[in-house]
Image: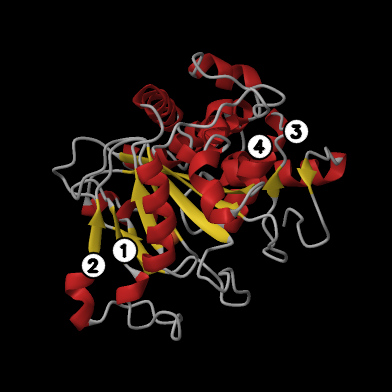
Amino acid sequence: MLSADSLSRGRSAGDRSHLTNKPDRLFEPDTLDMNQLSERNAIVKRAGDIKFWRSICPQLSISESPLGSHMKPYAVSPSDVKKATQQVLEEGYFQVGPIVPRQETRLLTDAVRTVVDHGFPAPFVLVYDQVWQILSRLENLLSPILGAFYCVTLDVWIYYIRGFREDSADSKEDSGWSPHRDGKLVISTLRGDGRPQLLDVWIPFTDTTVEHSCMYVLPTHLDPNYPDNLREWSVPRKSLQDIRALPAEAGAILGWNEYALHWGSRGTRWADGPRISLAARFQSRDLDGSGFLTLDANSSFNFQARLATIGTLFNRYSRRKKCPEALVNFCRGQVLLYEAVKLGIFKENASERIP
Ligand SMILES: [Fe+2]
């Protein structure tokens, strides 16, 4: 890769030999690199500038403490609560809703599009309060599953999956996700009665059909590899008819335990826009040793801490989404900075440190 230094190295001011008798196109890479360099510097500068983020999405906020007692839980019908509680117990996953109001999902859809249009990967929308506020308002649905006072972990991601174009699928994310189980097998996160202590929640911000990379699941009670052969991630031929497609309206809530086999399908050219969604992990209060940082609703969670969180996510999921190299380095720097200044915004124990 060329740097500004390498562009000038070895050439005297009057030396134009590299330009003579050569086609113009040989000159282009140098020009492009200078432009790219400038773009890289600009995007890094913008990433750390709170005024920039406020200016591109003035309808959203970045405050010191986005959560707190003023956050009212979303209303959830008794039938949805009953369904989610029973379904996750009996089938390893649930789908209910919509729960998050359309007005809120539309606001976040617009924000994600804006962030992406400005050259940032979609997870940078995590700088805004409103994403975290959604996660803090699911109590009526999640408490019956996880128990009271469960935690929101900082293992959060924003997906932006375009319609299918083979020539532009530059990451795993762009092609959906192949069948997998989320959890590591080193710890068990299921209680004796089958209720999860770690729950993966997925919320579409856009209406998600089978043409938009919707989720699919093989319910655990129909998975011949569950629970004794969890290293197997394939769908046996005899189970093909048991696969469930999970198209979902914007604001629906889907969730699964750490071991349910699931995947996102590839988007199609018939999709009327990208599939934009949020994924987050929630943890019961009594689970030890998961290694996930948790968000303390009563502490500050300022702009700096959110950049550090985004940096941690890109460190952990570097294969998930391509990110400009300079931005990745910037994100890593934010994590180090966070470590250095010890903002003390997380409830932290010895096993819970930003990597
Ligand atoms: Fe997953």
Name the residue beneath numbered marker 4: 307
Name the residue beneath numbered marker 2: 243
Ligand 1 within 8 angstroms of badge 4 C-beta: no
Name the residue beneath numbered marker 3: 298
Q: Element type at marker 4? A: helix
Identify the residue shown where x is 52% and y is 64%: 195
Mark drawn on residue 217: 1
Residue 9 seen by the camera: no
Label 2, label 3: how far apart the Cα atoms are: 41 Å
Residue 300 percent coordinates (x, y) = 76, 31
Q: Is residue 278 above or below residue 196?
A: above
**Sequence-first tag of 2 and 1:** 1
Label 2, label 1: how far apart the Cα atoms are: 6 Å
Label 1, label 4: how far apart the Cα atoms are: 33 Å
Label 4, label 3: how far apart the Cα atoms are: 19 Å
Q: Is residue 336 above or below residue 130?
A: below
Q: Is residue 252 left or right of residue 292?
A: left
